[in-house]
Image (cartoon, helix red, strand yellow):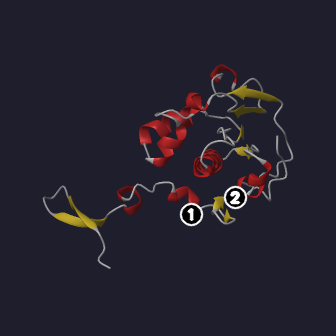
């Protein structure tokens, strides 16, 4: 297969060919995170590992930025309407589109936060199963970003729409010792 390259002009007037960023061209930027995580189960859900010996002593909601540092052990959680933390300019979409400006914003917003509860994307028994699965997947991607990019402890959040979905929604949490 021929490698895709682009011509990059140099200061001396010449140009060199550089490989194209295929993840960017194919809009699959989340692969950068997924390649750094183990995937489990029939849907390749990213695994979250949480085996912390220390625990948060305070939970600050995503919307309560002024409370993120109430104590050194404060955890940021996402127990609010999804639109508050996952709108057009939300973290998942910044990760998905590799929006460097938005990612820098979120890194600054969460600067020095040591604990997160994995985002609580709403799942329902009366919507398409694929939509529910995609919501769980998005929560895992954001949790991976907190863990891998911010080096924070991420406590998995257990979301499910009905008891028949346990095996799918809990896939990838087998090694999580702690659930809120």
Q: Which x, y percent locates residue 164?
A: 77, 54
Q: Which x, y percent locates residue 111?
A: 61, 34
Image position of 137 (left or right of 5): right
Q: Residue extending furthest bottom?
A: 1
The disc at residue 99 is none
Image position of 173 (left or right of 13): right
- CA gap between label 2 and label 1 equals 11 Å
- In the image, which is nearer the foreground, mark 2 or mark 1? 2
Quadrant assignment, res 78: top right
Image position of 165 (left or right of 148): right
In front here: 151 or 129? 129
Identified at 85% across, 52% down, the residue is 177
Judging by the rendered image, the residue that carries numbered circle 1 is 35
Q: Is residue 47 above or below residue 61?
A: below
The disc at residue 47 is 2
Q: Secondary structure at mark 2?
A: loop
Q: Which x, y percent locates residue 87?
A: 51, 32
Q: Is residue 9 above or below residue 84?
A: below
- The quarter of the picture where the C terminus appears is top right
Badge 2: few (under 14), some or many (20 or more) residues near its Cα, within 10 Å?
Answer: many
Q: Is residue 162 above or below residue 28?
A: above
Q: Earlier in the sequence, mark 2 or mark 1?
A: 1
Badge 1: few (under 14), some or many (20 or more) residues near its Cα, within 10 Å?
Answer: few
Identified at 78% across, 51% down, the residue is 50
Q: Secondary structure at mark 1?
A: loop
Q: Which x, y percent locates residue 141?
A: 59, 50
């Amino acid at each position: 297969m021929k490698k895709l390259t682009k011509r990059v002009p140099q200061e001396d007037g010449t140009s060199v060919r550089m490989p194209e960023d295929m993840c960017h061209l194919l809009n699959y930027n989340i692969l950068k995170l997924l390649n750094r995580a183990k995937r489990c189960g029939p849907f390749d859900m990213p695994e979250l590992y949480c085996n912390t010996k220390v625990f948060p002593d305070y939970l600050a909601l995503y919307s309560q930025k002024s409370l993120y540092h109430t104590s050194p052990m404060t955890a940021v959680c996402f127990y609010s309407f999804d639109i508050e933390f996952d709108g057009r300019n939300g973290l998942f979409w910044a990760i998905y589109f590799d929006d460097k400006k938005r990612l820098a914003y979120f890194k600054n917003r969460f600067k020095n936060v040591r604990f997160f509860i994995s985002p609580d994307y709403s799942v329902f028994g009366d919507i398409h199963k694929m939509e529910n699965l995609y919501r769980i997947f998005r929560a895992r991607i954001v949790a991976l970003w907190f863990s891998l990019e911010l080096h924070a402890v991420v406590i998995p959040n257990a979301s499910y729409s009905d008891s028949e979905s346990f095996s799918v929604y809990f896939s990838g949490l087998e090694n999580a010792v702690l659930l809120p």
